[in-house]
Image (cartoon, grey):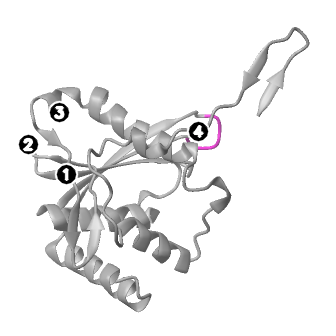
């Protein structure tokens, strides 16, 4: 779209960049069923509504990717440079692809990073989708410990501004197996796999 003002200045709106170019992943996403597809469908079945009007290529995805880059390149730079925090890469288990954000090899902990408009006042145990994903990543990476780092864009919705919160979770082998079985069974029931 072209805009002009009374002095003759012309503005041309540029196309929005593809969010994938901001991702820290250096591989192309494999074709097939991904864990995120399944966990989103599970949330929808539980009654969570997603605003599809924002679309797949929205600035929301770019913000999430930039949050991952910030954590990797700045906040945890020393750990990355020492090789103690690495990209976990893509994994495939039982026909399902998953891409954990990172692996802290010094502590052998799975790292997952999120950027959300949800309130920071929400009970962290209610981030079902995140915990399902973290447990699956833990299973894939062979650890029982996951760290969730969340940027709450709107903070507490009471004037706090953006907030960053982190949690470290320890899971039993049974929790990890039951979580994965639940994901697989749901995907099979919905004929996703």
| Label 3 sits on residue | 80
Q: Earlier in the sequence, mark 2 or mark 4?
A: 4
Between the C-alphas of marks 1 and 3, the distance is: 12 Å
* In the displayed structure image, the side of residue 31 where residue 93 appears, left or right: left
| Label 2 sits on residue | 106
Q: Do the residues labelled 3 and 2 touch (CB within 8 Å)?
A: no
- SS of the residue at dot 2? loop
Between the C-alphas of marks 4 and 1, the distance is: 28 Å
Between the C-alphas of marks 2 and 1, the distance is: 14 Å
> Can you name the residue that lies furthest to the top here?
7
Q: Is residue 156 magenta?
A: yes
Residue numbers of the magenta segment? 155-159
Snapshot quadrant of residue 143? bottom left
Instruction: Mark yes or no: residue 4 visible.
Output: yes
Instruction: Mark yes or no: residue 143 visible.
Output: no
Residue drawn 87% across the image and 8% down it:
7
| Label 4 sits on residue | 16
Q: 138 above or below 69?
A: below
Q: List x then y, in percent, for residue 163.
A: 48, 37
Residue drawn 39% across the image and 85% down it:
186
């Amino acid at each position: 779209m072209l805009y002009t003002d009374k002095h003759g200045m012309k503005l041309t709106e540029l196309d929005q960049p593809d969010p994938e170019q901001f991702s820290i992943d250096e591989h192309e996403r494999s074709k097939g069923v991904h864990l995120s597809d399944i966990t989103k469908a599970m949330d929808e079945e539980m009654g969570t509504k997603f605003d599809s009007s924002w679309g797949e290529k929205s600035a929301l995805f770019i913000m999430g990717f930039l949050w991952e880059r910030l954590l990797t390149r700045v906040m945890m730079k020393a750990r990355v440079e020492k090789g103690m925090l690495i990209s976990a890469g893509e994994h495939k288990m039982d026909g399902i692809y998953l891409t954990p954000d990172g692996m802290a090899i010094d502590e052998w902990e799975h790292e997952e990073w999120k950027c959300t408009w949800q309130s920071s006042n929400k009970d962290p145990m209610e981030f079902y989708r995140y915990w399902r994903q973290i447990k699956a990543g833990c299973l894939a990476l062979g650890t029982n410990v996951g760290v969730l780092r969340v940027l709450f864009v709107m903070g507490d919705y009471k004037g706090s501004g953006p907030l960053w919160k982190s949690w470290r979770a320890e899971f039993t082998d049974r929790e990890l197996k039951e979580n994965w079985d639940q994901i697989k069974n749901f995907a099979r029931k919905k004929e996703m796999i």
